[in-house]
Amino acid sequence: MSKSKQPSMFQALLDKRKQVEPDKEDVATVSIAEPEIEVHSESPAAIQPEAPIAVQPKRKPGRPRGRRSDPEYTQISAYVPLDLYLDIQDELAKNKRRQRKRTGLTVSELAENLLREWLEKQKSD
């Protein structure tokens, strides 16, 4: 039995791609003209450059930016006894339930508050 030679599946895809995408040699090049420069008769000191406008990139809807991606924050680590950490988490959860809040004080916020209080005390002494 003689098998007729059929193009492979990949060859058919390549042929179809060549039909859709022109070869690089077929692409025409476009030249861009130089912009015209305006000449002012005023002295250079009289011409004030326009103030640059700070354009904030439009944020997509969704979760607010977290501390991890905020350049105003840095991550530190500290070693604390596990039982102390677990007790702190329990107390924070109890406070959250007492105040009937969806989100409560985090360990990070608690540490920040305590460090600020300590720093203010050190500066006042």
Image: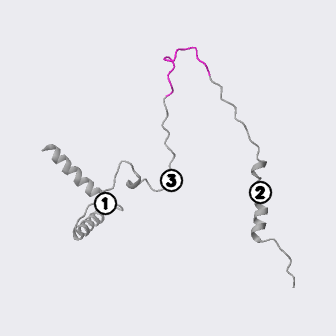
Q: Which residue is mark 3?
A: 61
How crowded is the residue under tag 1: few (<14 C-alpha within 10 Å), some, or many (20+)?
some
Q: Amino acid at mark 2?
A: Val
Numbered label tally: 3
Percent of width and height locating residue 32: 70, 35
**In this view, 11 is above or below 116:** below
Q: Main SS type for the magenta part? A: loop
Percent of width and height locating residue 25: 77, 49
Q: Is residue 124 left or right of 23 when viewed as pictured?
A: left
Alpha-carbon span between mark 2 and mark 1 = 55 Å
Residue 48 magenta: yes
Q: Which one is in front, 2 or 13?
A: 2
Upstream in the sequence, badge 2 or badge 3?
2
Percent of width and height locating residue 120: 19, 46
Element under disc 1: loop
CB within 8 Å, label 1 to label 3: no
Q: Is residue 101 left or right of 4 when viewed as pictured?
A: left
Q: Which residue is mark 2?
A: 20
Alpha-carbon span between mark 1 and mark 3 = 24 Å
Q: Which residue is mark 1?
A: 106
Q: Quadrant of the N terminus?
A: bottom right
Upstream in the sequence, badge 1 or badge 3?
3
Q: Is residue 32 left or right of 60 when viewed as pictured?
A: right
Magenta span of residues:
38-50
Which of label 2 and label 3 is nearer to you? 2
Upstream in the sequence, badge 2 or badge 1?
2
Q: Amino acid at mark 3?
A: Pro
Choose top left, top right, bottom left or bottom right for residue 11: bottom right
